[in-house]
Amino acid sequence: MANAFFNVPKPVNEPVKAYAPGSPERKSIKKTLQDLKSKTIDIPMVIGGKDIFTDNKISMHPPHERKHLLGTYSKGTADHVQQAIDAAMEAKPKWEALPWEEKAAIFLKAADLLAGPYRDLLNGSTMLGQSKNIMQAEIDSACELIDFFKFNVQYMTDLYKEQPDSNPGMWNRLEYRPLEGFVFAVTPFNFTSICGNLCAAPAMMGNTIVWKPSSTQIYSAYYLMKLFKEAGLPDGVINMVMTDGKVAGDECFSHPDFAGIHFTGGTRTFQFMWKTIGENISKYKTYPRIVGETGGKDFIVAHASSIPAQVSTALSRGSFEYQGQKCSAASRAYIPSNIWNEVKASLVKDVKSFKMGKVDDFGNFINAVIDENSFDNIAKYIDAAKTDKNAEIIVGGGYDKTEGFFIEPTVIVTSDPKYTTMCDELFGPVMTIFVYEPEDWIKTLHLVDTTSPYALTGAVFSQDRYALEEANTILKHAAGNFYINDKPTGAVVGQQPFGGARASGTNDKAGSKHNLLRWVSMRTIKETFVPATDYRYPFLEE
């Protein structure tokens, strides 16, 4: 048994590879994409370390290439969810008893595997399965997930080092126990890194996991499980089930050992989960931890002093990278009339220059939205804007799902600051702009604050420091991640802990020790070295 206090390797953010023409990484990922597309795979559930196949096979197709078959996955039932719970509970005693440094070593190894031999696999599967260009995949499935693994190990050790003071004659200690039960991880399609972290963060703290990935992210989820296995994660610590969300939820939320949920997804889904947990609260051994990040109606607001080129670039990148399918993507903007013509001209020029198509053509900035349901929903809003007197589409507005679910990046200008696309979360490549008069700056800030129930990300542009402070004060609760003179996307682990409040979630800040704290239950231990032998206190003396 080791007797030492261990220092873990100092985490450094993973460098983002450029994939420039002629680079070795470009050649390598191109080959991986070809290899992945040349075969079909049958993806099992993974329960207790065993591959579980069913006869209910669901086909997987790239959103940008509907006719191409990547493979199938085995859809499970409620029985499989129960098996996953049983496997998690069986693995729990041995896993939580494993010394923390051994757990740390597993995830540090996972980080290095992902930086090396698994980089192309995770990037390539994310590109094909979720329709991400190479840059969006690189910063997500490679770099951010590597950062989550490495920085969370550091945060874990920092947390364990936080100990209380002790007066003479006693020793006070804090023990950071895993939760008493299993954690249910429900993950989204849009970020492979989020999927990995929602499982890994609670597991690192000694918990065991039942994981239900999104049906549109299962292709890369399969390689994530391969990564965990090769890193040495014991069987049963993370169990992957592929069922309908309600099926998994019904089993997990009715189980007495349910100890917490780690969720990223839709607002209504999260609210329904919270309600269900509340209704079942008397069934549980402990009060479950509820950690969730949901939607956003993220904003960019520009002051009259803003530099037009900076604002337009933030709109182009912040609205349309990954087809606007980021919880942090800007989808509403407030631009003063004095700079609007310059911003408009630059923005329209940028959007018209975007190339759209398959991910294996690296010249394409825009790819497909995730599935037909998303496509149809976004198209409905675009069609409504085409005929609404309060809206004008200044660029984009086209869509086609013949070969893939392609929607042109679309910019709507509205005369109504409460127009539907200024309020509703579309989760696609649609930006709506309201042009205001410069003298209405303060009024506009209050408008930004009150238009949406969400409070995830937001950005303000200004060269006027007084204006920035006004925005910072009025919009204090409007965004959990607030950006000054930058687009509201691209949070980096170790630099900008991520999460929002209001309808956007519990703001437990992924990529920080504050999130890890939710996956432990602290025990205070006080040891007195020489206990008292007389009940009498000095005040009792005459």
Image: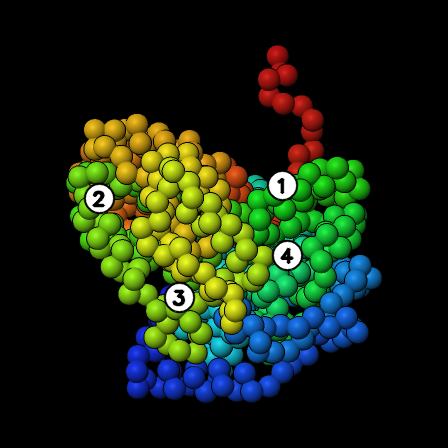
Mark 1 or 3, nearer chain start? 1
* Residue type highlighted by circle 3: Ile
Instruction: Check disc 2 and report its element: helix, strand or loop.
Output: helix
Mark 2 or 3, nearer chain start? 2
* Residue type highlighted by circle 2: Trp
Which residue is identified by label 2?
340
**Distance CA(mark 1)–CA(mark 3):** 32 Å
Across and down, in percent, residue 123 comes to: 47, 74
Image quarter (top left, top right, bottom left or bottom right) of the N terminus:
bottom right
Instruction: Check disc 1 and report its element: helix, strand or loop.
Output: helix
Mark 2 or 4, nearer chain start? 4
Specify whether 263 is left or right of 397: right
**Distance CA(mark 4)–CA(mark 3):** 30 Å
Which residue is identified by label 1?
271
Across and down, in percent, residue 173 comes to: 58, 47
Mark 1 or 2, nearer chain start? 1
Which residue is identified by label 3?
366
Q: Residue at x 66, y 61 (%)?
A: 211
Let me know if residue 174 appears in the view. Answer: no
